[in-house]
Amino acid sequence: MFDLASTREVPTSPLRAVSSPSQASSVLQPEKVTISIVIVVWNAKKYVLECLDSLRKYLGDVRAEVIIVDNASTDGTPELVAELFPEFELIRNTDNLGFAKANNIGITQSSGDYLCLVNSDVKFTGDCISPMLKYLEENPGVAMIGPKMLTADGEVRRSTMRFPTIWNNFSPAIGLDRVFRSSGFFGGLLMSDFDHQQTIPVEVLNGWFLLVRRSAIERVGLLDPQFFMYGEDVDWCYRFRKAGLEVVFFAEAAAIHYGGASSADAPVRFYLEMYRAYLQYWRKHHGWLAQQLFLVTLAVYHAGRVLGFACSYVCSPSERSSTVFKLKRSLACLQWTTRAMRRKESASQVQPALTNQC
């Protein structure tokens, strides 16, 4: 399916003893895998090792295969994974193929009835996979679920969204989501009205930790590899919705997500790549007028932030260092938005900008 430049290091398949009526002795046969866990890796060695160590600790009795897809890391991550976690399958790409395409590689090499896509900067603090599997088994109409996201201090973080619309982008652009935080109408794209304490159907699960039925993927298709780093989760959930499949936020399971492990060194650049991915989504699913209105809402949002940070710079001298950074970031985003409105910025630039950096 893919033109790949990768090598695979495959562990021996797990075996179990089974009885046969026609044989007096037990024979060894490969165990049926229930779930395939796919983790895409690009550098960030500290987080990767913590993720895999915690996964090994809390995987429990779930019949699972773990597939690590390395996107040409240069910090020694794949070598350490091969040494410390020999029971996991390691696929080593010779180029950085992007987040979506690397996940697709892992999916196509998997055999489980369920696929679990986990970011490499996730830390398991308990067996959160078993209750999620049980929920899917008890609710055959649900195709995809995601757990509660926690900070390292145990605070609940946002991990759901609404499908992007002009209104839910405009609402936070003028601060209505902050004024009416408990309102679903004004809650905005990022669902400021939802406290993530209940298990409910949602429109979008952010792609840090997803558990999906294989049958649903066969119906909807793989992640769109045109989304290099961001936006693939929104696009996938949108395609699930169009296929009539339900997506659910599952509040009874949780894991820590450190967030931004691969992008921490260049926040401004990655901020821009996120907006490029969003524009790519709008160009894929909406017409020209909707695309332009989306860009207008971004311009309003960042113009307001530029003014706010400029005032903060004058009024709060002690915070000028962080204010200058935020001001430069919003200025860069505003400049990118105006270029995109003049059709000088292509959403297809996402991959070249990050091929050797993401």
Image: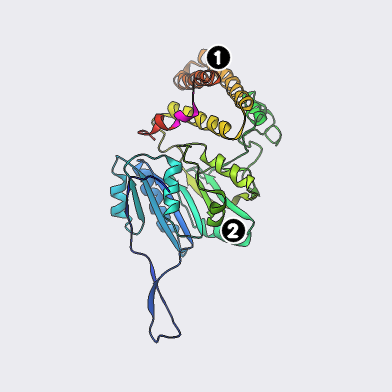
- In this picture, residue 91 sits left or right of residue 159: left
Q: CA distance from mark 2 to mark 1?
A: 50 Å
**Residue at x-position 61% and y-position 32%:** 286
Which disc is residue 271 wearing? none
Q: Amino acid at mark 1?
A: Cys
Q: Residues within 10 Å of mark 2 (few under 14, many from 20)?
A: some
The verdict on residue 91 being magenta is no
The image position of residue 282, as x and y in percent, is 58, 31
Q: Residues within 10 Å of mark 1 (few under 14, many from 20)?
A: few
**Residue at x-position 55% and y-position 43%:** 236
Residue that protrudes farthest toward the top in the picture: 314
Q: Earlier in the sequence, mark 2 or mark 1?
A: 2
The image position of residue 227, as x and y in percent, is 48, 37
- Say which element carries label 2: helix
- Snapshot quadrant of residue 57: bottom left
- In this picture, residue 67 sits left or right of residue 232: left
Which disc is residue 136 wearing? 2
The image position of residue 64, as x and y in percent, is 44, 61
Which disc is residue 311 wearing? 1
